[in-house]
Amino acid sequence: MTTVESTIDHRIFSAGRLSIGLTLPLLHAGAIVADFREQVALASLADTLGFRALWVRDVPLNSADYPDPVGHLDPWVLLGALASNTTQIALASGAIVLTLRHPLHIAKSAGSVQTLSNGRFVLGLGSGDRPPEYAAFGCHAEARRERYRAHWETVAAALGEVPRVIPDLRPADAPEFMLLPRPPLPVPMLAVGSGGQSVDWIARHSIGWMTYHREPEIQRSRHSMWRAAVERLPAPAFRAFGVAMRLDLSDDPHEPATPLSLGYRAGRHALLALLDDMRETGTHHVALNPASRRPVRDVMAELAADVLPAFHG
């Protein structure tokens, strides 16, 4: 029988502890083109250095109007490459756009990554926040909340302990379908952003809530709201809280922290203090998005040598 201790989500999210992951692609500040062969090599290095998770984004379309000019690989293609080039680190989607993909395709892809990675995948799901993309895919942005819930139900059924396929239509002569191969472990499902849902809905259906970095007071307020929703569950349960945070790691280890959009510029001592405060206030995982002028491998090496041991020991 599968236990919490045997699943990959427990290595990322654990009560009273904080783990540290990385968001791909790993680029120096100002870079807008990623060499994805190098990204796979960096992912393998992150695995060796002891980072707990690699996060992959789902960016279906680009536009000159969007703030992120980086071209992202299809997440399932990249996750397949990562599964084949790493051995220990968790692989997580942050997040598959649940509302713009058919849920059975998502379930099939998630099960495939879980199989290739030998149970190291966490399926993070979001709703997307760009209304013009909905139109491009023939969907109405106003329906995203309902689509999110309906698609979540279909994915959860297909990936659960007793998997079952919920078809869109069921003609009288339709057979019972299944998704094969069955992955070695059920795929944990994580809400990334709110998806237009209440925190109570997220607490009932997800292993946790992953959100963007915000100012400390705002983040504490959101965390308090989340803890209250978890405490309202009908039975006591652990639900994770994670944060994605941009980081410009200074080469001066004593440089104090300076707020940036979605994160901080800081030396490692200030970073340690920030992360320790996040752990004390109930954050279970931080997905760092390093973006500095320093070589990426140097930043990874410093984090692995001087930051990870304080939290992964």
Image (cartoon, rainbow, N blue to C red):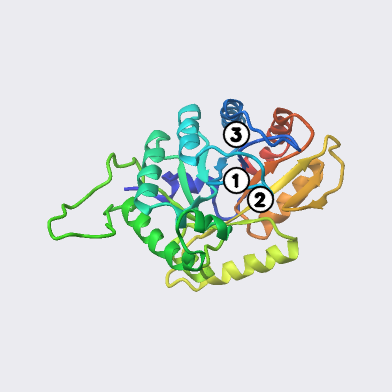
**Residue at 37% over, 39% down:** 112
Q: Is residue 208 left or right of residue 45?
A: left
Instruction: Where is residue 37? Give x, y as percent.
Output: 57, 25
Identity of the amino acid at label 2? Answer: Tyr
Q: Check disc 1 and report the residue beneath it.
A: 62
Residue sitting at x 82%, y 41%: 267
Q: Which of 77 and 280 is in front in this view?
A: 77
Between 248 and 46, the one lying in front of the other is 248
Q: In this view, does 240 lie to the left or right of 269?
A: left
Judging by the rendered image, the residue that carries numbered circle 2 is 66
- Return the x and y of residue 248 as percentages of the image width and height: 77, 42
- Tell me whether circle 2 and circle 1 mark residues in contact (CB < 8 Å): yes
- How far apart marks 2 and 1 lie (CA) works out to 7 Å
In the image, taking residue 222 as reference, residue 83 lies left or right, namely left
Classify 10 Å Cα crowding around label 3: few (below 14), some (14-19), many (20 and above).
some
Labels 2 and 3: the sequence-earlier one? 3
- Residue drawn 73% across the image and 33% down it: 299
Q: What residue type is labelled 3?
A: Gly
Secondary element at tag 1? loop
Q: Which amino acid does label 1 sit on?
A: Asn
User: Is residue 256 shown above or below 132?
Assistant: above
Q: Residue 186: x percent and y percent?
A: 36, 48
User: Marks 2/3: CA distance?
Assistant: 33 Å
- Where disc 3 sits, the SS reads loop
Mark 3 and mark 1: Cα distance apart in space = 33 Å
Indicate the position of residue 216 as horizontal and vertical percent values: 74, 61
- Residue 50: image tag: 3
